[in-house]
Image (cartoon, rainbow, N blue to C red):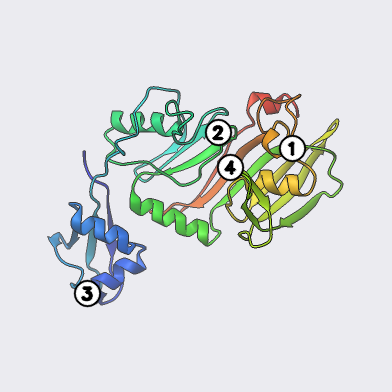
Amino acid sequence: MKPFQLTYTAEAPNLLREALGEWGISKRTLASVKYGGGQILVNGTEVTVRHALEKGDAVTVIFPNEEHGKGLVAEEGDLKIVYEDAALLIVEKPPFQNTIPSREHPFGSLANIVAKHFNDHGIPSTLHIATRLDRDTSGLVCIAKNRHIHHMISLQQQEKKMKRRYEALVHGLIDKDEFTITAPIGRKNTSIIEREVREGGQFAETEVRVLQRLEGYSHIILQLNTGRTHQIRVHMTHIGYPLLGDDLYGGKRDLLGRQALHCSKLELIHPVSGDPLFFSSSLNKDMQSLV
């Protein structure tokens, strides 16, 4: 399996260690390159990070091959690929599928199926899922193909350069057309699963826009400005409009057998080329039938 590698051009004299940091190579990634079988080449010659770069030097970082965790079983399954290259894999996750295995659902997860895809195509990577979705939530998922790419995407998330938009169906007719929910979220004292809006919780912000008002429920678009666990579900329940089918947070299952939530748009900057990427996904049939 050919390892993933990237080549950079030094734009000015610099210490190699400093240049690598400016190019987004984290200390953790650098350690994995140094001790995990990777290499750093300058103009084709292996060097250490103390090497002094000259303007125009070609720096190639060869990242070590990664292995799946021992507990992850590669499985056959349907995989709807939206986009794939040497760095990224964007897929659509159906409802009723875990993103990663759990005690209750150790097999059949998106991670199990992606592991098989990686094995079949000689991709030497463990799974770096950058945007997880709850089991019942459908839609777009971003997967990085190595530790460095995952780090670069995480930086984009921290700097709010990655945008995720969701569509949801919520109980009730929302009167405002557009608004922002800013309310801290923390773990509920009486549960290891549930979250709630609470004093001392983590800052959380969700932008909401109403698409249409239907018979007893509203079809909305949500923009996440933070990425807290169950953020949309908790915020919408907090303001009195729980998601259809979300019985954990007060929704009813008379119209839908799962929480009515779908990641419909994903925007990010390609971590290698710097090009903007835009992906979209249509609603699943169960939600589409209600709108």
Q: Which structural element holds mark 2? A: loop
Inspect the image, locate mark 3, and give the three-letter code of the amino acid beneath it: Glu
Give above or below for 163 relative to 133: below
Q: Residue furthest front?
A: 190
Real-space Cα distance between discs 3 and 1?
Answer: 62 Å
Q: Going from the N terminus, do you reach mark 2 or mark 3 first?
A: 3
10 Å neighbourhood of mark 2: few (<14), some, or many (≥20)? some
Residue indicated by mark 2:
135
Q: Residue furthest left?
A: 45
Residue 195, image x, y percentages = 63, 48
Residue indicated by mark 1:
250
Residue 210, image x, y percentages = 78, 44
Please tell me which residue lies in front, 244 or 188: 188
Q: Which structural element holds mark 3? A: loop
Residue 202 seen in the current view = yes
Residue indicated by mark 3:
54
Real-space Cα distance between discs 2 and 3?
Answer: 51 Å
Q: Going from the N terminus, do you reach mark 2 or mark 1 first?
A: 2
